[in-house]
Amino acid sequence: MKLVILDRDGVINEDRDDYIKSPDEWVPVPGSLAAIARLHHEGWRVVIASNQSGFGRGLFDMNTLNAIHLKMQKSLATAGGRLDAIFFCPHAPEDHCNCRKPKPGLFQDIANRYGLDDLRDVPAVGDSLRDLQAAQPLGCGLHLVRTGKGERTLAAETLPTGTHVHDDLAAFTDWLLSQPAKPQATA
Ligand SMILES: [Mg+2]
Ligand SMILES: [Zn+2]
């Protein structure tokens, strides 16, 4: 199975420091929808792993989050893309859950969903250090994009060894689709 795991804010859509609180505030990063469509057409299952602490902080409710995701799915469908699943952490930091990145809970949930023991060589794409830190224990390939908080992350953080850096999701997709087919973890 070809599986790729994407952060949402700053990777697929433009990030905002005050959270994406409405469908109107969800604006795709240029080229990101076409990139997901290419992955989909090449047989990749695309899964989102996203912290949504704005929900945990009471900035928006579940209906609004569903409406935001509906806009994302419809925009993607128009571009010829598709998401296999959306995993998100609904908690605030003070909840001390195990799914808010940098904790690995979302990635463990994804592995469980697909019947995998780990996520060895599954590419994970994010714009923040915590995206990489959450994916690393499961054995994911680590990819930082410069969109969203990516430039800030590059300037301020020491990235895990072996992290690949790409301009954006489109550039990551170019890279991934140019790689020789590699056997991935199987159920
Ligand atoms: Mg992000
Ligand atoms: Zn959580």
Image: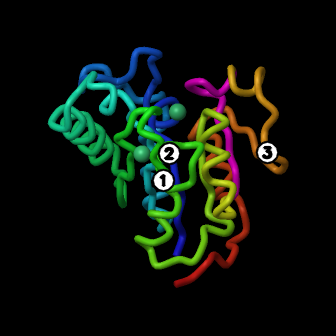
Q: Quadrant of ligand 2?
A: top left
Is 142 colored magenta in this rendering? yes
Q: Amino acid at mark 2?
A: Ala
Mark number displayed over residue 38: 1
Comparing 166 with 187, the one in front is: 187
SS state under label 2:
helix
Real-space CA distance between mark 3 and mark 1, rounded to the nearest whole angstrom: 28 Å
Give the magenta part as a residue range: 141-151
User: What is the total number of numbered labels drawn onto the structure image?
Assistant: 3
Q: Local crowd at mark 2 within 10 Å, few (<14), some, or many (≥20)?
A: many
Q: In which image quadrant can residue 168 be found? A: top right
Outermost residue, left side: 63
Please determine whether, in this image, residue 71 is positioned above or below residue 140: above
Comparing 133 with 36, the one in front is: 133
Specify which label sits upstream in the sequence, 3 or 2: 2
Mark number displayed over residue 35: 2
Q: Amino acid at mark 1?
A: Arg
Q: Amino acid at mark 3?
A: Pro
Dot in front, 3 or 1: 3
Tag 3–tag 2 contact (CB < 8 Å): no
Mark number displayed over residue 160: 3
Is 143 colored magenta in this rendering? yes
Tag 1–tag 2 contact (CB < 8 Å): yes
Dot in front, 3 or 2: 3
Real-space CA distance between mark 3 and mark 2, rounded to the nearest whole angstrom: 25 Å
Specify which label sits upstream in the sequence, 3 or 1: 1
